[in-house]
Image (cartoon, grey):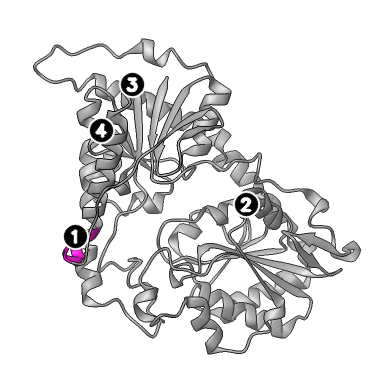
Amino acid sequence: MHVLYVHQNFPAQFGHIAAHLVNKLGWRATYVGLAAGGTREGIECIQYRTTGGATENTHFCSRTFENYVWHADGIFQALRHRPDVKPDLIVAHAGLAAGLFLRELYPDTPVVGFFEYYYRVHHPLSDMTFRSDLPWRPNEAAFLRARCRNAAVLLELQNCQIGYSPTVFQRECFPAEYAPKLRTIFDGIDRSIYHSRGDELRPPIATRGPRTIAGVAVPAGTRVVTYVSRGFETMRGFDLFMKAARLISQQRSDVLFLIAGDDRAIYGGDATYLKGKTLKQWVLEQNDYDLGRFKFLGTIPQPTLAEMLAASDLHIYLTVPFVLSWSMMNAMSCGAVVLGGRTPPVEEMITDGQTGLLADFFSPEDLAEKALKVLADPDAYRPLGHAAERLIEQSYSLEATLPRMIKMYEEAIQIKAGLESPREPAKAVPRQVLARKKPL
């Protein structure tokens, strides 16, 4: 079986899946993205480039779609010059129009679309309006643009045989008429990286000596609170986390905050309202912080991140109703006690008091109160981390989700075989294609 994965970034949502299929099952995987070409973990990577994009003269509402088209064209041109690439299946990130033009190159190849999110404008759980506590609101242009941002996604929904979303919340954002076409299959956590280390990194408080975590010297007896976000932004509650952390630090002098991520906005419109400042700069101006208690680590390699999460006494995760971050699932997989803001994507994974803790998303006071209970006796809350790790291993690890992923791939091939052009007689399901893979 030869699968062509299409995504701007590598490894993103597909790299670990492709590596498993290649190295464990003997499949062939080709990955098309913006990263340099070559071979990584047995996956052939093909680089594409864009030669144009939206400009200031492009209507604000259609700039996203214009950029999507240029990416689709770059992907098409890169593969057009590789006639030796003849995939049995295409798996594409649908939010980038990544697979849209590939029908012209591979008319008989089924397409599976990865559907991450569908923007809803004036909805009770819209990511645009959920942060009603902020001193700014989305402007009119943002609402107008949001109505256009789904254009490429809808085209991809029409273009694919099957689509999937990683969580029920994300899948249910899509229009109801597409529900029969969409599955819920999580990306799969790589447990070879993200797993607990027992007392090695998180020893009992009574015997806890000095440690080094992610390159940071941690004094004996210190409690460690972690926060991870690709970018520091209001959509991921960075401002609320910092307010809660300040309250925690005022109550306990033995807590160190390890924070991974970059001081930039990935999602949302924070930059529009902050007048040249980053959210971190804005947050630090609002209150006095003992910055000696906060270690900002930037973007760190996955093994280092896993080490940090496996050493955490408490991991705090916040998000508006939006795409669920891998970081929360990685923390659970590392056996960390996770305190999450109570929003639908978080509640889907955390059962309060069983696999983690939940607090009022909008209340730093509630977050701090619950965090302080954990930090008063981290050892007593360890069963929550153990239960979270078991949940990931049993239901959300790569080993747990991959059989469902393969079944979906096979279903897409079967659907395509039954939807041949009426100008040709229907062909039987290509069992010889399915037979190329080794059994699980």
The residue positioned 28% from the left and 41% from the top of the image is 74
Q: Is residue 64 above or below residue 190?
A: below
Residue 60 among magenta residues: yes
Looking at the picture, does residue 31 appear above or below residue 53?
A: above
Quote the CA–CA distance across marks 3 and 2.
34 Å
Which residues fall within the magenta stretch? 57-63
Q: Dots 1 and 2: beta carbons under 8 Å?
A: no
Label 2 residue SS: loop
Q: Is residue 339 left or right of residue 144?
A: right
Amino acid type at mark 1: Ser
Query: Which residue corresponds to mark 1?
Result: 62
The answer for how far apart the CA atoms under marks 1 and 3 are is 33 Å
Q: Which mark is residue 86?
A: 3
Where's the C terminus, which quadrant?
top right
Secondary element under disc 1, as helix, strand or loop, is helix
Q: Amino acid at mark 3?
A: Lys
Q: Is residue 299 magenta?
A: no
Residue picked out by circle 2: 301
Residue type at numbered disc 4: Leu
Residue on which the image places disc 4: 102
Quarter residue 4 falls in: top left
For disc 3, the neighbor class at 10 Å (few under 14, some 14 to 19, many from 20) is: some
Q: CA distance from mark 3 to mark 4?
A: 11 Å
Marks 2 & 4, CB-CB < 8 Å contact:
no
Instruction: For marks 4 and 1, give the CA distance.
Output: 22 Å
